[in-house]
Amino acid sequence: MVAAVEPAGPRPRPVTPARVGLYAFLVITALFFLTPLYVMLVTSFKTMPEIRQGNLLGLPAEPSLQAWGHAWSAACTGLACNGISVGFFNSVKILVPSVIVSIAVGSLTGYALSFWRVRGASALFGALMIVAFVPYQIFIYPLVRIFATIGINNSIPGIVAIHTIFGLPTMTLLFRNYFASLPIELFKAARVDGAGFFRIYSSVMMPMATPMLIVAVILQVTGIWNDFILGLVFAGRENLPMTVQLNNIVNSTQGERLYNVDMAATLLTALVPLVVYFASGRWFVRGIAAGAVKG
Amino acid sequence: MLALRPRLASKLSAWLALSPATTILVVVYVGCTAWTVWISMTASRMLPSSTFVGLRQYDALFANERWQISVSNLVVFGVLFMIASLVLGFLLAVAIDQRVRAENVLRSVFLYPFSMSFIVTGLVWQWLLNPTYGIQAVGRGFGFETFRFDWIVRQETVIYCLVIAGVWHAAGLVMAIMLAGLRGIDEDIWKAARVDGLPPWRVYVSIVIPMMGASFATAAVLLATSVVRLYDLSVAMTNGGPGIASEVPAKFVMDHLFERQNIGLATAAATSMLITVAAVVAPWIYIQSRRRRAA
């Protein structure tokens, strides 16, 4: 705890008991955070006889990819045994249009709310920020009924609409705040040049908004990929996302549970957000910070 | 006249651009909420009914043992999860802020669980807490024959398992928010404190923590909304069990909507969740808006 008051710049640092305690705390917590990932990995490479011997933390004696192959293409959900790959491709089918549509609607809304003096704009924005906190359970029954009436229940368009609806508050906030930080002269100059509403959006503002676009993509890709409840209710049995299928594989198995397959399937499901997280680095934190200031 | 026309066109365009957001706000966020609240005051069971029964569904709800357990679980989980996440997240941020080595690695380690879904989180911890093969088996393997860590299969303790998994998932988020808050604090405060001879822990307790009210509020509100939404974690980790010992309100709503087909009770439960969220979020929004007006 001694070092925080030091001014910037390198200087020799004595090894004090406080410093040792600090590192001990960090290392122990880091182990707590890393253990689940490590256990998932080693379990997925073990064989079932080896798992039954115990030794949760041990490295696999004969590392095998068999569980991974089984998880990907042969694990059972109910009667169908086609592996979690079905869920993977369903999630991709849901993810791509949902990310595009939700960001398009959110950025357009944020743009209209920041540069254009529309009557009721601040009321609309304030209301969107408040409703972001309402639990999904409030909306589910009416939405199922509405979607059934207009014929998009249990379909890809239905789940895309759902992700657009529930992504709207955060996406709007993200883009509105970003556009509000841009100099207004930029907008005025485009107006003087005779550009209209959509022209300014597509040719001036969106190209400027690349950083926010990256943040929005990161937020939406991880958020939509990790979604469970909305996919379960609105995607339909043919399009269940990977998270729902993973839960079915692990929790509704008949007979002996294959823990190595379970862990391989779990890792496969976590792979997309983990890759996004480690590839995006500080952008991910920026996304959290930008999404965190809602309200 | 000629000059007016493009302006009018742009104004129409702005209205057009805001129409998806307005529609979503009115139809989904306001309309569906009203619909749900209305159904909760009717005699609906398997099919919706329009017979008004006042608060009778709520009487039935609060007399329902499963709902009572769900609510008390939510309180226990909410209090422990929020305190543990805030304390651990803050300590991690302070520790990382001491100019430690490998800061980036440590930050990634603490935050990566947050990028994964609650389903993945729940399944990993289900495996780690499995009494036959998990942490209990590891403890016994080290020679502690009587070591007991079977919380997940015992009704009195299963909710603490959800807390452990939840903290693992969310503490990194708190750390990221707190670290941003710490880095925003004026360096001069540290210099002044050093001149005054204050020990660093005093500076943290008496000066830094009070200055970080906004960071704490943001983190607390984010955690609180995830508490009310708690659903996936319970489904994946224990599916509400053993028995109904780890049921939560969101799961109560979903099960009564789709499995038990009791729409009236489900919507009454959803409305109760909404009221809880409003009680948490409304004061925060009020304070924020007053602060913004003052600024």
Image (cartoon, coloured by chain):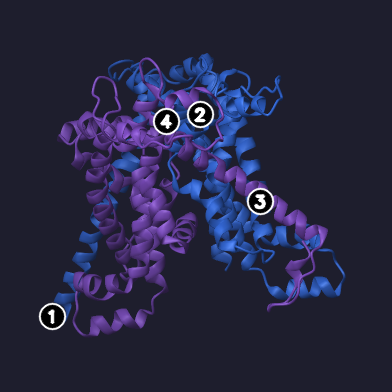
Chain colours: A purple, B blue
The quadrant where residue A234 appears? top left
Disc 1 marks which residue? B1
| B274 w.r.t. B209: above or below | above
Mark 2 residue element? helix
> Dot 4: within a 10 Å radius of its alpha carbon, few (fewer than 14), some, or many (20 or more) residues?
many
Mark 4 residue element? helix
| B279 w.r.t. B105: above or below | above
On the image, the x and y values in percent for residue B258 come to: 33, 22
Mark 1 residue element? loop
Disc 2 marks which residue? B126
Mark 3 residue element? helix
Numbered disc 1: what chain?
B
Numbered disc 2: what chain?
B
Please state which of residues A125 and A211 is positioned toward the viewer in this rendering.
A211
> Dot 1: within a 10 Å radius of its alpha carbon, few (fewer than 14), some, or many (20 or more) residues?
few
Disc 3 marks which residue? A27
On the image, the x and y values in percent for residue B66 come to: 51, 17
Alpha carbon of mark 2 to alpha carbon of mark 4: how far? 13 Å
Numbered disc 4: what chain?
A
Please state which of residues A47 and B197 is positioned toward the viewer in this rendering.
A47
Are the numbered discs 1 and 4 placed on the same chain, yes or no? Answer: no
Alpha carbon of mark 3 to alpha carbon of mark 2: how far? 24 Å
Q: Residue furthest left?
A: B2
On the image, the x and y values in percent for residue B5 come to: 14, 75
Taking the image as shown, residue B27 lies to the left or right of residue A135, namely left
